[in-house]
Image (cartoon, grey):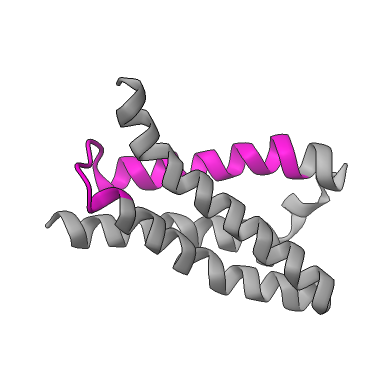
Amino acid sequence: MHGAALATLLVPALVGWALCGATIAVGRAVTSLRNALIAHAVAAPIIFAAASFAYFSRAPFTTPLQTATIYVALVMVLDVAVVATFIERSYAMFASILGTWLPFALIFGATYLVGAYVTR
């Protein structure tokens, strides 16, 4: 996989991860943590549906299942490496179904479903 192809695959996911982070940051600034997590759980699949649509509308070189796996794995790794380690300085976020595991599942599902729809 060469650099341009890798960028085509990963840039939408990185933008999606950043937008999800912005959703949490803004939500925490203007409302309760619970409401911010609910907003994030609603926004995450919408954001990643748009990200995967951007990827699959080009010349995709991965299947919907591969892409969904890569996208959610990237989000997980960045959440561990950046959010938990440097921003929160705690791994407690991974004990929250609403805050972590539900959005991961919804990101996977949205990415897969959009990919399956666009590539059919």
Magenta span: predominant SS is helix
Image coordinates of residue 36 in percent, x first then y, are: 73, 73
The answer to whether residue 2 is seen in the rendering is yes
Residue drawn 67% across the image and 44% down it: 79
Of 68 and 51, nearer the camera is: 51
Q: In this view, does 102 lie above or below 81?
A: below
Q: In which quarter of the image is residue 86?
A: top right
Residues rendered magenta in the picture: 55-83
Residue drawn 71% across the image and 64% down it: 24
* Magenta residue check for 69: yes
Name the side, left or right, on which 41 lies relative to 68.
right
View extreme (front): residue = 4
Of 20 and 58, nearer the camera is: 58
Name the side, left or right, on which 47 lies relative to 61.
right
**Quadrant in the picture for the C terminus:** bottom left
Name the side, left or right, on which 42 lies relative to 5.
right
View extreme (right): residue = 89
